[in-house]
Image (tube, rainbow, N blue to C red):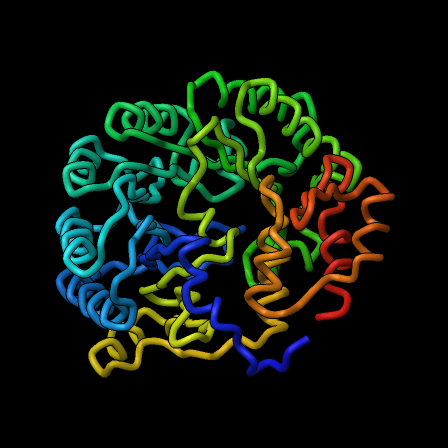
Amino acid sequence: MPSPNSWPAALTEDWQVGGFGLYVHWPFCEAKCPYCDFNSHVTRRIDHDAWREAYLSEIDRIAAQTPGRVLRSVYFGGGTPSLMQVETVEAVLNRVAQRWTLANDVEITLEANPSSVEAGRFRGYRAAGVNRVSLGVQALNDTDLRRLGRLHDVAQAEAAIAIAQETFERMSFDLIYARQDQSLAEWDSELRRALDMGVDHLSLYQLTIEDGTAFGDRFKAGKLRGLPQEELSADMYALTQEICEAAGLPAYEVSNHAREDRQSRHNLIYWRGGDYAGIGPGAHGRLTLDGARIATEARRNPGVWLSAVAQGDAEMRSTLNTTDIVLEYIMMGLRTSEPLDLARLKARTGAEIPAARLAHLQELGMIERRDALVSVTPAGRPILNAVISELIRDFD
């Protein structure tokens, strides 16, 4: 395996295989959900003009470093980007179009919470260029919505879904399962209800308790009761795959289901090992520059980030070594239903996974191989972390 500083020439243009996208982080929310470990903040006063100018300045800076690229996606995440002024979204997208060539089928997604959905504002986002919306519904049960700290009820969620479907070419919404006191039958009913709404993309996440969240604190104190046992969680996962597959929305990633050609193009850039620029507090990025793979991380505190932009010091950068690239490519790539291309991995890094290890996993029925392409089988999917651990054993 080459040393960490030995970079093959093929790396310089490898972003063209995985794609190039832009992530824009809006850090503000109306309330902090107890399960959320994202970089989101609640504040009463926002200087929208200052935030707009900061985003434009960062776009200019990154575009100067990435000339000649075709931008496949823009993703407004958060936080709650549907709290952004339409003028800010429009200004960002106008500047993006000035600085990069946009793909003919460029995907422009904006995350929204049902409590902040207004038909007029959504029409404004659509006119600005947004063509896909992702709604944080999380549950179709009012009791559980309150437990999850959500500000909307089921009726508002259904209304928001209807507005989104009327306004945008594409839409998705999120649900969380394996919630407190949730039975398998209840999840079955809720998932089928979601599919009956006619969506073409669903993100379905198992509730995880993260350190540093309100749920995490309650769990440590023994006050978060009713969480499912591991066996029930596994049954819910299996049921999710079965129901979505039958409805024509198979899993194309561990937690994401979509109809044909309705996958999230932006997220595929992450999972395919493409390049993406990240702007806004706490945003991460991966850029291939001058033959090296660069990891970027913006300063997390919103006020600090805003001030740092003016000083040209809004992000930290580090160069990934060969091991870093191998680990990321395998861990991200095997999350999807697409095969992992070991020939591409070798071209990028010179690294190879031992043939005996691949053969062993294949004999166990955990992976399938076709030449240099490797896929996780349905049997291997529930124990994906173990499969990945075996493949990266020489690198971590």
Residue 333 placement, left or right of 183: left
Image quadrant containing the C terminus: bottom right
Q: Is residue 142 visible?
A: no
| Count of numbered circles on the image | 0
Instruction: Looking at the picture, tell me which residue is in the foreground, 128 or 288.
Output: 288
Residue 178 placement, left or right of 379: left
Instruction: Looking at the picture, tell me which residue is in the foreground, 278 or 276.
Output: 276
The residue sitting at 61% across, 42% down in the picture is 254
Above/below status of 20 relative to 352: above
Above/below status of 195 relative to 5: above
Q: On the image, which quarter does residue 100 sit in? A: bottom left
Residue 294 placement, left or right of 63: right
Above/below status of 329 relative to 362: below
The residue sitting at 60% across, 36% down in the picture is 177
Image quadrant containing the N terminus: bottom right
The residue sitting at 43% across, 31% down in the picture is 261
Residue 306 x %, y %: 25, 73
Residue 357 x %, y %: 82, 57
Instruction: Looking at the picture, tell me which residue is in the foreground, 368 or 110.
Output: 368
Residue 180 x %, y %: 64, 38
Q: On the image, which quarter does residue 332 sit in? A: bottom right
Q: Is residue 321 visible?
A: yes
The residue sitting at 33% across, 57% down in the picture is 22
Residue 335 x %, y %: 61, 47
